[in-house]
């Protein structure tokens, strides 16, 4: 196991820095706050933290509009604060990953200000500019992810520029070798500074089809979808040339000691997603993010098919990964309810592969209401009422019962979860039946059992609402049995598990195992070890 890259067995914990811990009373979390809470992450049992963007930004999209790729926004602290955090993270045996945003910069980035200054500026081709159509219309029918055309008219130079997201986020032209070199240098800057890897934002977006043809109309578009989905993103995303770029990023990461990891944000189905592993000769990202558990039908039959199909599709040199939520998608407890969120936690932390835990999910934070006058998210402000608001999953971390849940001495930038006085770290940390205790137990079990962190996976035949599988690594063997329903279920135990021990239950206490058939309570999940 000493030769195994750390990221294969690691659990990554995603932190939304604005909402984790504020140390200066401005209501916005900061890097010093993250450093202050590192011991909590050690006690929780995760192995790495990933920070959503902390770079200088006008915050049109809360940091995903980067104005300087090689510095820290004063809201979060300084470059020195980040250096301190990196050192403190490593001193505790943890790894630190940054968010890398290569598809677009801020419209306030110095590169774009130059590009926009004149048509003959040397950086004009660093972004994607096009003339209007003869009738004055936009160059093509591409739709921004935030609604409206992906093209913005620039009166000064008399052309449109492309933006896949907000107009304040112009797309970089990765077909320009100077752009490519500059953005690879950004990775080098942070790797030299000691970061352990990157989550790469919208990796599948960064190259567009030559000629920028119209996207096909979506024949399945219906009311309630975002405007973006009125067309299929055939030519605006997932172009073949992206793979050489991600392979170049991987070559750079692999040139550093310490197994630096690249995690790609790629919202594509399994067959296309696998292409981002690259090949053995030209590997790309170690983890093309697998988002399939997010929004997938939550029942045993469909999940069994999903997990089996995904695991079977992993290339021999690849390694799976799993995630239940992030800063863009509804929290798992909101989607499936708290009882099944406990099942989901056991699933996430026992499947074959590397899991990512989103901050606050270990507390079971569910739906958070955001009053209309407190809405911050540009996605909701531009297309209100269709379910695109990301504010509810970005609310401050509740630490204790003091003012503002111990997050800040000032007014938090977003409201807290309504039940923060009881759903917080201090209240849950010693409670035997809490969601936090369940996470700590599961994470401790991963550390103690290579079957969970590195082992093989084998699905077991089940009926009804039961999902069951084995994990095995050498002589270490465990059985995971999950009841995804609200009624009792029965499941046959494999011979090797008869007379075994239930190590962890999603309910208050693990049962005694008698006989060859297991009776599961509603919403119960068990991890079973063989008889000693």
Image: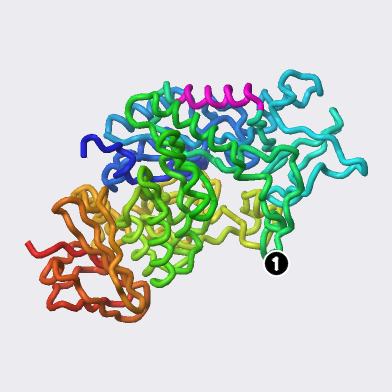
Q: Which corner quadrant of the image does residue 342 belong to?
A: bottom left
- Main SS class of the magenta portion in the image: helix
Number of disc labels: 1
Of 484 and 364, which appears nearest the observer?
484
Residue 409 visible in the snapshot: no
- Write the residue at 38% across / 40% down: 49
Measured as percent of width and height from the top left, residue 22 is found at: 45, 40
- Write the residue at 43% across / 25% down: 191
Q: Residue extending furthest right?
A: 135
- Residue where numbered disc 1 is placed: 222
Q: Residue extending furthest front?
A: 281
Measured as percent of width and height from the top left, residue 223 is found at: 71, 67
- Write the residue at 61% across / 61% down: 387
Q: Residues within 10 Å of mark 1 (few under 14, many from 20)?
A: few
> Within the magenta stretch, is there residue 181?
yes
Residue 201 drawn above or below residue 85: below
Residue 319 visible in the snapshot: yes
Disc 1 element: loop
Measured as percent of width and height from the top left, residue 352 is found at: 32, 53
> Within the magenta stretch, is there residue 64?
no
Q: Which corner quadrant of the image does residue 324 belong to?
A: bottom left
Say whether residue 484 is left or right of residue 367.
left
Residue 319 drawn above or below residue 113: below
Of 15 and 19, which appears nearest the observer?
15
Measured as percent of width and height from the top left, residue 334 is found at: 47, 64
**What segment carries the magenta color?**
176-190
Q: Quadrant of the C terminus?
A: bottom left
How is the protein colored in the picture? rainbow
Q: Quadrant of the N terminus?
A: top left
Of 2 and 37, which appears nearest the observer?
2
């Amino acid at each position: 196991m000493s030769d195994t890259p750390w990221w294969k067995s690691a659990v990554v914990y995603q932190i939304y820095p604005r909402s984790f811990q504020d140390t200066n009373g401005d209501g916005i979390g900061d890097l010093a706050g993250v450093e202050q809470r590192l011991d909590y992450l050690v006690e929780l049992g995760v192995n790495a933290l990933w920070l959503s963007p902390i770079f200088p930004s006008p915050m049109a999209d809360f940091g995903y509009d980067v104005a300087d790729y090689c510095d820290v926004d004063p809201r979060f602290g300084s470059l020195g604060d980040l250096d301190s955090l990196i050192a403190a993270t490593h001193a505790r045996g943890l790894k630190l990953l940054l968010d890398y945003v290569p598809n677009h910069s801020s419209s306030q980035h110095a590169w774009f200000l130059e590009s926009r200054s004149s048509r003959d500026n040397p950086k004009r081709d660093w972004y994607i500019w096009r003339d209007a159509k003869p009738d004055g219309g936009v160059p093509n029918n591409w739709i921004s992810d935030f609604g409206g055309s992906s093209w913005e008219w620039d009166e000064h130079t008399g052309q449109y520029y492309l933006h896949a997201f907000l107009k304040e986020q112009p797309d970089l032209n990765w077909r320009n070798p100077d752009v490519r070199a500059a953005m690879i240098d950004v990775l080098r800057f942070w790797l030299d500074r000691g970061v352990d890897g990157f989550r790469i934002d919208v990796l599948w977006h960064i190259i567009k089809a030559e000629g920028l043809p119209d996207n096909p109309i979506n024949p399945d578009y219906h009311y309630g979808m975002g405007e973006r989905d009125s067309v299929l993103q055939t030519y605006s995303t997932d172009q073949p040339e992206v793979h050489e770029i991600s392979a170049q990023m991987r070559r750079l990461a692999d040139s550093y000691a310490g197994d630096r990891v690249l995690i790609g944000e790629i919202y594509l189905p399994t067959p296309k997603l696998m292409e981002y592993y690259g090949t053995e000769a030209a590997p790309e990202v170690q983890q093309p993010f697998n988002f399939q558990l997010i929004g997938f039908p939550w029942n045993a039959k469909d999940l069994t098919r999903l997990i089996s199909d995904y695991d079977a599709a992993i290339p021999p040199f690849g390694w799976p990964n799993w995630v239940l939520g992030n800063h863009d998608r509804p929290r798992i407890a909101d989607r499936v309810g708290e009882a099944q969120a406990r099942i989901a936690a056991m699933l996430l932390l026992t499947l074959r592969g590397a899991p990512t835990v989103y901050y606050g999910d270990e507390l079971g934070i569910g739906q958070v209401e955001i009053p209309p006058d407190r809405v911050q998210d540009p996605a909701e402000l531009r297309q209100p009422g269709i379910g695109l608001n990301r504010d509810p999953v970005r609310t401050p971390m509740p630490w204790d019962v003091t003012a503002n849940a111990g997050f800040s001495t000032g007014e938090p930038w977003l409201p807290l979860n309504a039940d923060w006085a009881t759903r917080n770290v201090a209240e849950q940390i010693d409670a035997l039946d809490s969601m936090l205790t369940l996470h700590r137990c599961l994470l401790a079990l991963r550390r103690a059992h290579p079957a969970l962190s590195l082992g093989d996976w084998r699905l077991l035949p089940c009926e009804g609402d039961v999902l069951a599988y084995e994990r095995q690594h050498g002589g270490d063997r465990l059985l995971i049995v999950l009841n995804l329903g609200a009624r009792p279920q029965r499941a046959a135990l494999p011979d090797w598990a008869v007379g075994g021990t239930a190590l962890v239950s999603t309910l208050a206490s693990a049962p005694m195992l008698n006989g060859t058939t297991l009776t599961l309570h509603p919403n119960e999940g068990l991890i079973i070890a063989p008889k000693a």
